[in-house]
Amino acid sequence: MTKSGLEFTMLIEIKVPQLAEGTPEGTLAAWHVKPGEAVKRDQNLCDIETDKVVLETPAQADGVLVEIKVQSGATVTSGVVLGVIDTEAKAAAVAAAPVAAVAGAAPSAATAPGALPAAKKMMADQGIDASSVAGTGRGDRITKGDVIAAVEAKPAPVAAVPSPTAASAARPAAAPAPTFAPPVSVPLGNRPEQRVPMTRLRMRVAERLVQSQSTAAILTTFNEVNMKPVIDLRNTYKDKFEKVHGVKLGFMSFFVKAAVHALKMYPVVNASIDGADVVYHGYYDIGIAVGSPRGLVVPILRDCDQMSIAEIEKKIADYGKRAGEGKLGIEELTGGTFTISNGGTFGSMLSTPIINPPQSAILGVHATKDRAVVEGGQIVIRPMNYLAMSYDHRIIDGREAVLALVAMKDVLEDPARLLLNL
């Protein structure tokens, strides 16, 4: 309980949730409510973007958002106060009409009787007429949050462009650079440009990709796979599979199972470098690269060797849905011993994927297309897929890399071996 004059209100601070270990800070991506608006308990007030996920910040109680302390785009850490909810205030009208002035004269901000001290000072600093601000405090008193809302509602003034002479005659001291720059459009006639700050996720992805290329000795090996056996198997059982398991039978589960088969045969492909040591992982956690509105994310399928085809398909479908909604958790994006990237969903024919550190290899899957191939001395048409596996040549020799990719090819062209563990 806090006291202001004779008024008692219940104020609740909105704080940044506890960020995950290894994630010291995040970015306040967006507010979903404005000062003066009513909020409900558990309603998402704003999003905190880290280098892995977007965290929601729910309201702890019903009330009115009376103050925003941190604006969108600012860098925040765990526990930082983002704003304040008043549980006893009334929501401001969506379009409040200005209060008529008494005797033709509107009260100034300094003498407005219905404004709290902090609100009076802010109105005086901003040159805002108290009669144009709708109060949402008890007794319709004007709060600081009401003034902030009024300031945000005012159209930004258009600054006059100074002449070169005036600009050179008096140059003000440079202001400190802001922590976040909003999108800026530069008018260039019929050649417009827009400068948009990178998201925290995009910056993290860029950092890791540069790290991968600058620290690993990346080499890529290729092979082609006749996908007809897998396609025939899928066409035979896809309807019954969906009816029994409640999920569609795709192709990615076959690639996951083929990768696990190869990693078991060549454990160094499933290993990673830690300083001067090579760490051989006795488990198979495979990351599946997924595109999302925020950028590329790689959720992890844990213990793939113990998962069935149906379990893999269900998990991939769940990850894809939640990636689009921005609801993947930190723990689902952490770790992994091997990655599969499926550029074929976008029509890619061939690529050289970049390793996701500290992993030592990544499989690139591409579009399956009908191509002319030679079988038994005859030219035939087969649905072919080009596979590319990039690997860290510091610990994986060409022999292991090539043989691992051949092992994947072999079981994909004879998928019964996946069921028989051959």
Image (cartoon, grey):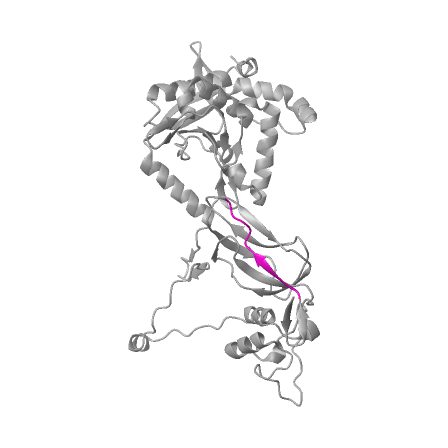
Which quadrant of the figure has residue 186?
bottom left
Lateral position of residue 145 relative to residue 369, left or right: right
Residues 346 and 247: in front is 247
Q: Position of residue 212 (x, y in %)?
A: 36, 37
Confirm whether residue 2 shows in the render: yes
| Residue 13 among magenta residues | yes
Residue at 56% across, 56% down: 15
Count of labels in the image: 0
Residue at 53% across, 55% down: 79
Residue 23 vs 377, above or below: the answer is below
Residues 8 and 77: in front is 8
Which residues fall within the magenta stretch?
Answer: 10-20
Q: Position of residue 159 (x, y in %)?
A: 43, 73
Residues 22 and 332: in front is 22
Which quadrant of the figure has residue 392?
top left
Residues 67 and 102: in front is 67
Residue at 56% across, 52% down: 47
Lateral position of residue 320 relative to residue 245, left or right: left
Lateral position of residue 214 relative to residue 180, left or right: left
Q: Position of residue 332 (x, y in %)?
A: 54, 37
Residue 94 vs 132, above or below: the answer is above
